[in-house]
Every structure is written in structure tokens, then in C-alpha cells.
Amino acid sequence: MEPAATKTASTFTQGVLTTRRRFRFLGLTAEDLIRVFFGGNATVAIIVLALITIFLLREGAGFFGQNQENLRIYRQAGLEYVDYMRTQVDGHTALTRELSALRLAQLQQAMAAGQTTEAANASLKDFDAFSDKFSDAIVPLRQLVSELTSGPDGDAGATAIKTKFLVAADKRVERQQLIAAGKTEAAAQVRIDEVDFEKELQPLLAARPAFEPASRELSASLTALAAKPPAGDFGKFQADVHTYLAGFPATVQKIAAWDFNQPVAFRQAFTSFLFGTQWLTASLWQDWYGIIPLFVGSLMVSLVALVIAVPFGVGAAIYINQVASPREQRWVKPAIEFISAIPSVVLGFFGIAVLGELLRKLSGVTWLDWVPGFPFSERLNILTAGCLLALISVPTIFTLSEDALNNVPRAFREASFALGANRLQTILRITVPAALSGIISAVLLGFGRVIGETMVVLLCAGNRIAIPDFTAGLGVVTQPTHTMTGIIAQEMGEVAVGSIHYRALFVIGLMLFILSLLINYGAQTIVRRYRISIG
Amino acid sequence: MDDTMHRFRTSATAAARRERTVFLLFRVATYLVVGCGVAVFLTIFLRGAGTVLQKEAPFVNTAFFTQAPESLYVFDFEGVHRQMGFREFQEFKAAHPAAKLNPETYIYSAGGIFPAIVGTLLLVVGSMTIALLLGVCAAIFLNEYARDGKFIRFVRLSIMNLAGVPSIVFGLFGASMFVVGFKVFGIQFFGWNTSLMAGWFTLAFMVLPVIITASEESLKAVPKGFREGSLALGATRWQTIRKNVLPYALPGILTSSILGIARVAGETAPIMFTAAFVVSDKLPWQVDHLTDMPFQGVMALPYHIYVVSSKIPQNAYTARVQYGTTFVFLLIVAVIASVSIILRNRLRNRYKW
């Protein structure tokens, strides 16, 4: 409403009002009350946004304290100490796996050369002897680590210390609850066995002198073995062994310097969440809450979706807005709008039931071998989820880009035509650049739509919590992954309210919330700042 | 034909050819998008039709719409391959006590989806009522009362940001605020557990930006002259809105809000941990007091689709309920969406003065 008109109207109504006796409440007339009522409703948007922030923060904030505690126990119960040693065992396991992959390759090579399975296996005798020796070298160290983990009979070691601590913590909670309920006597009955970490850790620390010789022996025997490999291409393997052995001194040093009493900084509770590469829950050993695998998964899926959706969405917008006949416009626009109404769970089901299998079959086609990552065996992976998310984001990108193109002043196009440019030149050099800010913000909002999407990724992304293996190049898109939205949907139903896991999910939710606000803000800023003014 | 003329023509044709090719590419992109949408629809409709429709009159598989889900029992008996729902199987077992059946069972794969349909309907009606009340009032304020200022800009910014919040975040919010609740000075607020109420409010807040934007658009479409005429005749602001603005804006508000219905009906993430049960034996109104009804959890179609597509294996026996449920759900959402789109296109530019 124009200010002038409003002013006249309101002075006029005021004039009428003052001449009559009116109902008043707290000094407000009925008119004012109505206004306040409507205004109150308008603030609901602000209130809801504030409430979301408050509740996510309230539930999520406790996570970092709990995570610090989680890390403290990890150190004090000696789990960290054992994990240092375990890195050597794990590295060895990876090398053994590499060896067996090498053996398979050699076997296939031999069989491709026309040998029978028996003959091929026989020809690999040297190889087998080598890999046996290689595997045997780790046995003493593995024994040591397994003893420290759970003791020779499975009832001691770091696991047992942690369990003792957790039992004591439970008892403490029980006593607190009893005291809160006023049952002081019963509370006094609850016996808490406080854990004396120093005493409990003695057997673990006693193994410290044994570790270094064992590790040195392993290093020596592996160096000797790697120097004399059997026939075949062992270049990469030797290099890997070398890097593996090069890490030994650092580990030995870490173990020598390890002290259970070293405090865990509060900062570590943040860094282990923000930069943690493991999301491991309900584990017998140690729970990790690292967001990186989930974040990378979300990002990968969204990127795949956008790579597919942007050309299609923007292309369709250009076609419909600039090229298509009015009749085509009339039915294509509602049709694409209609696609946006397909619920995401339906698309997710479509992915599980149809698209996943279809893509896997397609990847098996021989003449498509050149596509990176083809063929693949997991039907639910980043690509499947990405394709479906693309379908979800295309309507968003299409509608907003079309709006942006529509807002380009007619005069721009006419001037271009008048200079003798044809339609394509006008579109690519005048109309699209003029609408570019709108198109970019459309793509950003499409990205926001995709990264917040839950059901499709939950159903179709494969739900494997691991950072995708980027050494596969572009083929990484055919690996399964897990996402931030997916993990919330999957685990929220199973966690206890108030537990560290519950709070970790809220922190992820908070991050999603902040991310969506940032995306929204970015889209608005781009539109505002780079809008081409008419005139 | 002379040379220069010819040269002009070739260059012109090359440009024209490029133009044609690029336009063709754009066109193919457009039709591919539409084609993908159609492919999804057709697949679900064709495969789901087998469950929902039947050859004899009444042509619709009424059992699928009126029964609760059951486990499916598959077994061989006297050389005949049989599959039946739980209740039927119990009768069958009673009739053949001697037989050793060893059935394979698939949960939720027999029976129908009646409770899920009911749950979705209740969720939609409740949350749309809340969202419409709040949203339309907010839109009236924004369009009729408010003058541009800091407060209004802040409100608009909030609405825009609210529209971009992922639905799973609304789910988390609803779970912590309405389901778990909170205590202030020892007084418990909310804490409704998994219930219709929690779902209503969560969904209503989620759809609020859609409703506000749609309502504002409809209010804006009412010509200014309507208000000015009324005010000039001495009507108050509220009288003007009530008699001269709302009646003309209401059809637009309602039709645009139908799109909100499609959104509410279609979302799964917000109700996963606020309102939806995997399975519930009781219908929401089967309670001791009617006032308990809003505090019951319900089954919902989208959540049921999630459950049957992720928690049970994919095979010939389970496909029936998977495609059938998806068919019904997609049909409902598609009808709502197309009604909204058609009505909106009709209403657009209806008032031109």
C-alpha cells in the first residue's frame, strides 16, 4: 500500500473513531487488537527459527563435554596406548591384503596364459612360501596387542579397565538418582568401586619394554623378506613395506612417551568431531564421533546430483523461457513442477527397486567399460542416490532460473537483435549473462535442497560409513557412502535421550541447519549484489 | 548465383545450423527431465496397479485399502504353492493340524494399508489447520498492516530461511521440543511422546513458509482499488480486509495451500521420530477417551513405504505391498498436486482491473 493512501485512510478512520465510544482493552481499540493479533502471528516465523536454534543448541551443546569425557576414558583406561601398538598390526594386515591381491593377479595371468588351475597354483609355490613367512612375522606382536586388549583369557586388559570405569559411572548415577528420590539409606548401600587407573594399568605398562624388541624384530624380518621377493612385479609392494616400516620409530616413540594422566584438552572434543575420520558407535572398544566421513558423503552425493541437474535444469529453463512455443510452455512448466511434488521417499523406493539394479546392469555392459568405476557390484551407491537427487533438484533449479531469465528486461534482447545477433547469440551472450546471478542462486538453492534431502540418501546411498576411496578417481562415485541426513534418520530412533550419541546427532543437525542458513544467505546475497538494474 | 552472395549464405547457414543444434540440445534436456518424471510415475503405476486394481468388479482391491498390514506366510502344501496372511494362516493351520508347513514369513507383506492411510489423513488435516491459521494471519499482517521497516525485514528473512531448513532438522527439533519436552522450574512442558500432536506441530512449522508465501501472493493479487474504495467509504481497516480483501483472496490462498498439503503428506523425515509408528495395532480413535486421540502415534503412508522398502527383502512376495503402497501414496500426492496446479493456473490473473 502506498504510504500516502495509508496516511489519508488512517487519519480518516481515526477521525471516525474519536467521535465514537469504543471498546478498549489495555488502552487498545478493537482495531489495534486485531492488528496486534495478526502481528503476533507474523512473529511466529521468527519464533520458530529461534526455537529451532535453541533446541538444537540445547541438545547438541552437551555433546562436547561428553566427548571430552569419552576421550579421557579412552586415554586413562589405556585404550589409546593399545591403539598405538595396533597401528603396526593394522598396517601389516593391509600389506597382507595387498599380497593376496597380487597373488590373485598372478594366478589370473597364469591362467590367461593357458595353464590349468592346479598348474598355476603350483607355479606360485615360491609366492606362497613368501607370503606365509610374511604373515608369520607379525604373530608375536599381534599376540601382544590382543593380550593387552582383553587379557590372555579375555577378562583383563584395557577393555576390562574401561568396563570397570563404566560400571562405576553407572553406580554413581544410580546413587545420585536414589539421593534425588530421597532414599539416602539405599544410596549409601550402593557400592562404587572407584577405578585406580594407575594400578589397573600396571600390567599394560609392564608390556612396554617387550614392545620395542618385538617391533624391531618384525622390522628386521620384513626388511629381509622385502629385499628378496619371489618372481613378479613387487615394486609397489616393496615401496609400501618401506613406508610402513618407516613409521615404526614414531610409533615406538609415541608409546614410550605415553602417559595416562595427560589431560585431554577441551579443544580436542571439537577437533575429534570436526576432523574425525571415523564414525563408530555402539562399539565394544571405543566409540568415535567424527563427522568427516558423513560430510564427505553428503558432499559427494550432492555434487553428483548437481553435475547432472545443473545442465538439465538450466538448459530446460533456457529452452522453455527463450525458445519454446507458448503451447509447449503451457504443458512443460506444470509437468516439471509436478516432478517436484513426487515425494522423496517414493523416489528412494524407486532407486532401491528399479534404478539401482538398472545402473548396475548398465555398468556391466562391455562397451561401457571405459566409464570410470564401471562395472560396479553395489547397486546402492553415490551414483544411484545422486541421479535421484538430481531429479529432485531439477525443478528447483528450473523454476528459479526460469524466473531469473524472465526478469531480464526485454530491451536487452531487442537491442541485441537490432545489432544483428541471432537468437542463440542473444541467449548465450546477453540473456544468460544478465540472468547469471539469478541462475547461480538457483543452483545454490538447489544444492541446499539436495544436501538436506533425507529419504533418498537413506534408502539409496548404500549406508556404509567410510570416506570414499578417492584413489579410484572419478570411479569413486560408484562406491556406497553415508550422509549427515541419513545418519540422523537411521540412528535417531535407536539412541537413548541424553546419551552422547543422541547429542552427536543433534550436533550434526545443527551443522545442517547452519549450512542451510549459509546457503540461503549466499543465494540472497548473490541475487541482491549482482542484480542487473533496469535503467 | 554470384560468389559474394553465396559466401554470405554459407556463413549464415553455419550459424543457423549451430543455433538449431544447440536449441535441439536444450530441447532434448527439457524432454529428458520430463521423461524421467514420467518414467518414475509409469513404473510405479504399472507395477502397483497389480496390487491395487483387480479384474473383477469393483475393480479395486478393497481389502488392500481396508485391512491392517500382516505378515505373509509362503509355503508348499500338498504340492500347491500357497501364500496367505497371518490370520488366514492360523485358520489354515487349525484346519490341518497334522501338516508340517515350514512357511517362510515376510513381515508387513500381506493385508492392507488402512491404518497408514488414516494416519496420513489425520496428520495432513491437523497440521494444515494449524499452518493455515498461523500462515494466513501472518500473511494478512505482512501484506495489509505492516509497513516496510526493520521488523518486517527480519520477519521476511526468517520466513525465507525457514523455507530452506532441511526437513530432517525439523524432525530433530520436533523430537526434542514436542516429543521429549523440557522442564522449566520443575514444570514439564510438552513431552507428548511419539504422537499426532507432535507430528502436527512439526509439520505445521515446516510448511509455514509455503503457506505464508502463497497467501501473500493471493492477497497481493487483490487490486488496490478494492481496499481504497472500502476505506474511502469509511470502513475500518479490519472491515476492509474482512469484506473486501479476504473473500477475493481466499480461493487463491486455499488453492496455493494445496501444494502445502502435498508437501505435508509427502514428507517422511519430520514424522519419523515425532509421530510415526512402524506398526500399530490400534487405530488412533480406539482409545478410552477421545481426548487421548491426539496423543497417539499413528502409522503413516510415507513412513510405511520407508519401512517396507528398507526393512524387508526385495522379492516377488514383498513387491506386492511395496509397489501397492507406493502407488496409493503417489496417486494421492499426484492428485493433490495436479488439483493445486490446475486451480492455480485458472485463478491466476482472475482479477484484472
Image (cartoon, rainbow, N blue to C red):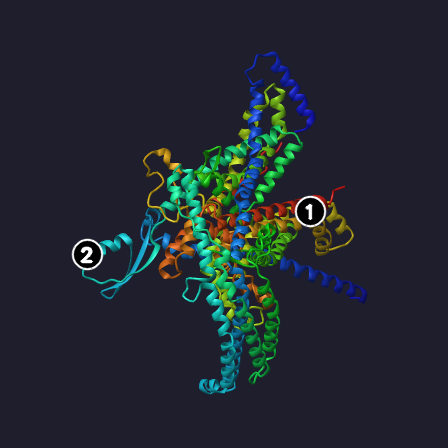
Q: In which quarter of the image is the N terminus of chain A?
A: top right
Foreground of the two, B281 or A336: B281
Q: In which quarter of the image is the C terminus of chain A?
A: top right
Q: Which disc, if any, is residue B16?
A: none
What element does badge 1 sit on?
Answer: helix
Is B257 positioned to the left or the right of B78 in the image?
right
Q: Name the residue under label 1.
A: A526
Is A362 positioned to the left or the right of B309 in the image?
right
Vertical relation: B311 (above or below) B128: below
Foreground of the two, A238 or A225: A225
Q: Quadrant of residue A258?
A: bottom right
Looking at the image, can residue B212 be seen?
yes
Foreground of the two, A420 or A108: A108
Residue A264: % across, % down: 58, 53
The amino acid type found where label 2 is placed reads: Ala
Label 2 Cα crowd, 10 Å radius (few <14 / some 14-19 / many 20+): few
The amino acid type found where label 1 is placed reads: Ile
Please say if the residues under marks 1 and 2 sit with CB atoms less than 8 Å apart: no
Residue A298: % across, % down: 56, 55
Vertical relation: A512 (above or below) B254: below
Q: Name the residue under label 2.
A: B95
Vertical relation: A263 (above or below) A240: above
Looking at the image, can residue B330 be seen?
no
Label 1 Cα crowd, 10 Å radius (few <14 / some 14-19 / many 20+): some
Q: How many angstroms separate mark 1 from mark 2 (CA)? A: 73 Å
Foreground of the two, B311 or B231: B311
Residue A328: % across, % down: 59, 51
